[in-house]
Image: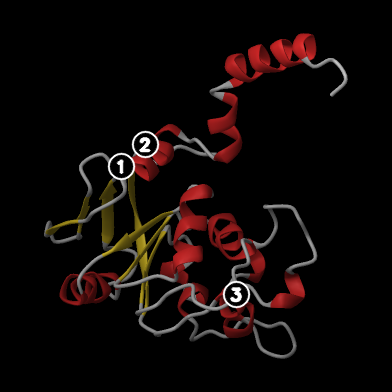
Amino acid sequence: MDKFEKLSGIAAPMPLINIDTDMIIPKVFLKTIKRSGLGVNLFDEMRYDGEGKEIPDFVLNKPQYRDAEILVAGDNFGCGSSREHAPWAIKDFGIRCVISTSFADIFFNNCFKNGILPIVLPEEQRDALMKDAEKGSNARVEVDLEAQTVTSSDGEVFHFDVDPFKKHCLINGLDDISLSLEKESSIAAHEEKLSTSQPWI
């Protein structure tokens, strides 16, 4: 998993509330178990018309937001089903941070496991960043995970809370498998002991 320490990027404003995981990645694209290739279908039903052509008014289709790495979203982002494909699609598109006032629990935890930083801020601060994001590609937002700050293009600084363990994992690029491999020597020692004491297993 990619490490997340600091990020300076374009923020795309998406003020809709209750953006669920089916809106993020429709169920028709859940056939794959690969984490790559889903970015093109991120927000598919909002990005494309019935003929597969881009809808110009959708925020991520606008030239100034095509390279967005931060998403400033409405309340209750990531609600709905627990599909892990949702953070896969977000990450594959290039977005590394989502800022909102609230997230669905399963989606929130899945973000950390896939190298995405979900940040919860009070409504007033989120709205300030939403307004800042509306400036387009000239407004770059800075996210510092170590310092736990978000800095707007105007230099306004907002502090956010994050679970210390989740922070450690993101900064060091540790997913569930990596965390297990940190204990590889202990696991090997246990298996060796077990093979001697209980060889029939």
Q: Which mark is residue 81?
A: 3
Tell me which corner region of the image, top left, top right, bottom left or bottom right, holds residue 160: bottom left
State which tag comes first along the sequence, 2 or 3.
Answer: 3
Amino acid type assigned to the residue bearing label 3 in the image: Ser
Rendered image quadrant of residue 87:
bottom right
Amino acid tagged 2: His
The residue where tag 2 is placed is 168
Task: Say left or right for 156 vs 184.
Answer: left
Quadrant in which the N terminus appears? top right
Specify whether 52 is left or right of 119.
right
Residue beneath disc 1: 164
Rounded to the nearest angstrom, the CA distance separating label 1 from label 3 is 27 Å
Please state which amino acid type lies under the numbered disc 1: Pro
| Residue contact at pointers 1 and 2, CB within 8 angstroms | yes
Q: Position of residue 28 (x, y in %)?
A: 76, 76
Element type at mark 1? helix
Crowd tier of the residue under label 3, counting other residues whose Cα lies within 10 Å: few below 14, some 14–19, many 20 or above: some
- Report crowding for label 2: few under 14, some 14 to 19, many 20 or more residues within 10 A (C-alpha): some
Name the residue located 55 percent from the left edge and 22 percent from the top edge. Answer: 183
